[in-house]
Amino acid sequence: MANEQVKQIDRILHDHLTQWGLRRLTSTRAYLAWEQREASAEDLAHFDRLAERRRGGDPLDDTAFYDLSVQPPLFAILHSQRYDYYQTVGKAIASRIREASTILDVGCGAGILTTFYARLFPDRRFVGIDRSSVSIQVATQKAKELGLGNVSFRWLAIDSKASPPGETYDLILSSHVLVQHEWDSGIPSESWRTFARGRDAARQLAFERRTGVGAALDWLSRALAHEGRMIVVEKTRQLARRVPFQRAVAARGFHMIEKPQPIRYQLFEDAIDDGPLYHLKREGHSWLEWDESPEPDDNPPLNPLDLRYRPVAADAPLYENHKPSAQQAWERLNPRIIVKEATYQEPDGRAFHVELGTSGAYVYLYCANSFDQRQLVVYESRRAAVLEDYYRDITEHMISCSSVKDPAIGGKGESRGSLLASGG
């Protein structure tokens, strides 16, 4: 897309969000001040209660949450939190609508982005559906106010009880709706040593049922025209959620038209990593493979020989990595002598491992779990006490939180002596 077109879309989208009453606030402090001026303490407390109940994953609680979120005075306040989200996702999807003539927007909410797409493509027909009847009422009224005759809205939940779609569409859009239980941790890896997931059909089916993604994808498959496309943005950036989601999509015959696109936007002072955005189609061939490896990160590779020349502040470690690449760095420590280690195993497959060790003139602490988190910290041997304390804090915390400890693999913190005593 040409730069001038991008700028034009930016202007239209900014004007569109303003017409919806949304504000772009860049600080949490400014946002909270506005929130306190516009909404009563009772309204905010009620919303917080619904938000907490929604974490349980009950569809009724989810619907009640969204019903309240679109009512004044909360509407502009709450949706302004997502201002940068609307800008980022709106532009990404708009640039991919292309030649589609009939477009279904699933989980459209109050229709903020649906009406933007309809405004941008007046010669196309848009339909928005959502499980919140109050949201559909708001969307319908706003479309009338904006004078949009090419968009309509329907009250519909795409779950296992949903009736078959009455028609098919050239393009289906879905953002933050297919994986309903957004706090679901996904499927663990085969062990803390690897990022790979096994092919356990029962575990995959359980994920699809818990999150509702299986029933939703089945419904969308029926609603999509034979040569239609689907653009999906879900909260599946974590590998434990991304892998089973991709497998659910692939199992229904979808392949990728382009590589998944990471989505990043601002939430006040914080950068949010979301998505990725999937551009999918059933028909035709694709040379793109479904990738089940962690995203590449920007941490520098570890060369143990370089540690002695690395300038650091007095109290800083020689090397610290909290990203998946920490596993490769840990594997490159050679020799690696374990002094203490502990592994905690839960019945649902969750595993957490922590080890304290030496590698030549250095001491290290390594943490890994089966939900893809990794951490490696390396110090000079004279700073061993720092990692001794860190190891003790971690293991004490894990003992207090873990319901099952496996003594055979160091469940209570198998010790091989002290780093201080080893002279390593």
Image (cartoon, rainbow, N blue to C red):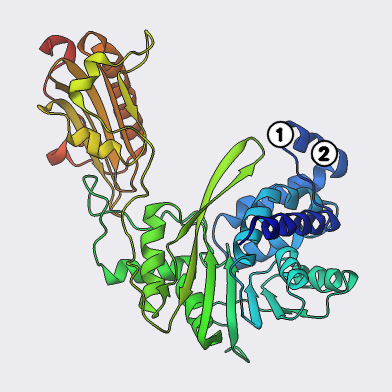
Q: Is residue 42 left or right of residue 156?
A: right
Residue 392: image location, x then y, percent? 29, 22
Q: Residue at x 62, y 58 (%)?
A: 89
Q: Position of residue 67 (x, y in %)?
A: 74, 63
Q: Amino acid at mark 2?
A: Trp
Q: Please tell me in which quadrant of the rendered image residue 120 appears.
A: bottom right
Location of the N terminus (image quadrant): bottom right
> For numbered disc 1, what is the local secondary structure?
loop
Lower position in the chain sequence, tag 1 or tag 2: 1
Q: Nearer the viewer, residue 396 or 385?
A: 385
Disc 1 residue type (three-letter): Ser
Q: Check disc 1: other Cα within 10 Å, few if <14, some if 14-19, many if 20+.
A: few
The reply to whether residue 96 is visible in this rendering is yes
Q: Residue at x 68, y 54 (%)?
A: 87
Q: Position of residue 8 (x, y in %)?
A: 74, 58
Helix, strand or loop at mark 2: helix
Q: Is residue 188 left or right of residue 156?
A: left
Quadrant where the image shows the C terminus = top left
Compared to 158, does 135 lie above or below? above
Q: Is residue 160 visible?
A: no
* Residue 293, x across and y down, in percent: 31, 54
Residue nearer the viewer, 340 or 28? 28
* Residue carrying label 2: 34
Q: Residue at x 15, y 39 (%)?
A: 409
- Please state which of residues 370 and 261 is positioned toward the viewer in this rendering: 261
Q: Is residue 337 above or below residue 140?
A: above
Residue at 59 percent of width and 72 percent of height: 173
Residue identified by numbered label 1: 27
Name the residue furthest bottom: 166
